[in-house]
Image: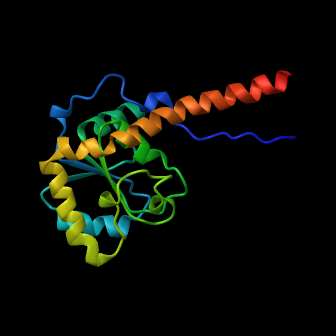
């Protein structure tokens, strides 16, 4: 039997229903507590002035709500290929900072500028803290850097449906 490509995509429920009011964004940083927590804790210690929220124990509505409010999503865990949380965060107009472990080092999997990717080593903590403060202060400008990532995520959904169609139309022949 032939194999067909089937890319990953984001469930539409995860995407914001209406355009996000960027003026309502708060100085909140989201993180995934299941990944890279030791390093994330060091960043939290370096930035006591900001509120950090762990993405856990929330239902879909609560997740959407916190994504809509936050300015930044950070992830210093290892990425097993395309990861869902950064893609959800970017669709909710969050800026993203990642480590360079696993797939996040590769532009194809986490297509954000190297300016927002850091090796998870202690000597980078001051630079990461500086970058986070810069995003908080200049959020609207920084957020534009992620527009191309948003276009890619929207395209993934379309590609997914096209691939499904191709598989089923092919099998009818």
Residue beneath the point at 27% across and 69% down: 42
107 above or below 159? below
Placement of the C terminus among the 4 image quadrants: top right
Residue beneath the point at 46% across and 28% down: 13
96 above or below 21? below
In this rendering, position of residue 147 left or right of residue 167: left
Residue 149 in the image: state x and y as whole percent: 40, 43
Whether residue 58 can be seen here:
no
Judge by depth and name the residue closer to the eye, 59 or 13: 13
Judge by depth and name the residue closer to the eye, 3 or 16: 3
Residue 123 in the image: state x and y as whole percent: 27, 78
Quadrant of res 119: bottom left
Display colour scheme: rainbow
In this rendering, position of residue 4 left or right of residue 91: right
Residue 35 in the image: state x and y as whole percent: 43, 61
Whether residue 107 can be seen here:
yes
């Amino acid at each position: 039997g032939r194999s067909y490509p089937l890319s990953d995509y984001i469930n539409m429920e995860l995407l914001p229903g209406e355009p996000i009011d960027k003026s309502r964004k708060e100085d909140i940083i989201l993180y995934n507590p299941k990944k890279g927590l030791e390093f994330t804790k060091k960043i939290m210690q370096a930035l006591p002035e900001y509120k950090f929220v762990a993405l856990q124990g929330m239902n879909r509505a609560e997740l959407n709500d916190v994504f809509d409010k936050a300015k930044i999503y950070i992830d210093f865990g290892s990425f097993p290929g395309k990861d869902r949380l950064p893609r959800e965060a970017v669709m909710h107009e969050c800026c993203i900072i990642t480590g360079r472990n696993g797939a996040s080092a590769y532009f194809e999997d986490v297509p954000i500028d190297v300016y927002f990717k850091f090796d998870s080593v202690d000597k980078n903590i001051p630079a990461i803290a500086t970058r986070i403060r810069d995003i908080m202060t200049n959020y609207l400008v920084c957020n534009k850097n992620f527009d191309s990532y948003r276009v890619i995520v929207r395209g993934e959904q379309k590609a997914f449906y096209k691939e499904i169609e191709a598989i089923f139309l092919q099998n009818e022949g």
